Amino acid sequence: MTKEEKTAVIEALKEKFDNNAFFYITDSSSLSVEKVNKLRRLCFEKGIEMKVVKNTLIQKALEAAPEEKNYQPLYEALHGPSAVMFAEVANLPARLIKEFRGDGERPLIKAAYIDTAVYIGDEQIEALSNLKSRDEMVGDLLGLLMSPGANLLGALQSGGGNIMGLLKALEERGE
């Protein structure tokens, strides 16, 4: 790879890191070509972009970012074969990896970057897959906000039915 090609890859990665608040550094080595192709296909279907890149190029792209991005802890994960997964939803790559490997052990999560929070190691897969997406959190919040009103409305409706039933019974007795 020429110096110009490396510079182009670093620039492309810098842009990806700037435009994505969620990315995972993974290790899919030792997977067969067939399994890697299946993983790539699943990533494509779920809207996850997967790139296999040299660790030195990843680190140079991360080093070029502002310090407040908090990329420094990710450097320790940059050893051995690495692939970067970029996603729009924080938990999607973890869920995909968990589903894909089933009883197997690959691909591994080496590190994950979720909106300035850094998760190191494959043992974080449960925590990462249980993260709620923005849409799920908005739905939960709306449910919490609507539940007191729904409870009040339900109580009024059920109470109204009881009162009407009671009045009807009293009316029938009076006849």
Image (cartoon, helix red, strand yellow):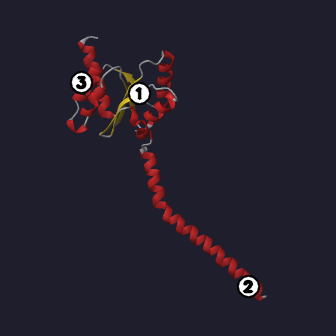
First-in-chain label (1 vs 2): 1
Is 52 located above or below residue 171 in the figure?
Answer: above
Residue 135 at x, y percent in the picture: 45, 46
Residue 55 at x, y percent in the picture: 29, 21
Q: Residues within 10 Å of mark 1 (few under 14, many from 20)?
A: many
In the image, 25 versus 11, the foreground residue is 25
Q: Residues within 10 Å of mark 3 (few under 14, many from 20)?
A: some
Q: Identify the residue at horizontal 49%, vertical 65% (top origin).
A: 148
Query: In what element is the residue under mark 1?
Result: strand
Q: Indicate left or right for 99 with 2 as reference.
A: right
First-in-chain label (3 vs 1): 3
First-in-chain label (2 vs 3): 3
Observer-side mark, 1 or 2, equals 1
Observer-side mark, 2 or 3, equals 3
Residue 170, label in figure: none
Q: Is residue 127 visible?
A: yes
Q: Which residue is mark 3?
A: 60
All told, the count of numbered labels is: 3
Q: Which residue is mark 2?
A: 171
Q: Amino acid at mark 2?
A: Glu
Q: Which residue is mark 1?
A: 108
Is 8 located above or below residue 142 in the figure?
Answer: above
Residue 71 at x, y percent in the picture: 26, 33
Q: Indicate left or right for 41 with 20 as reference.
A: right
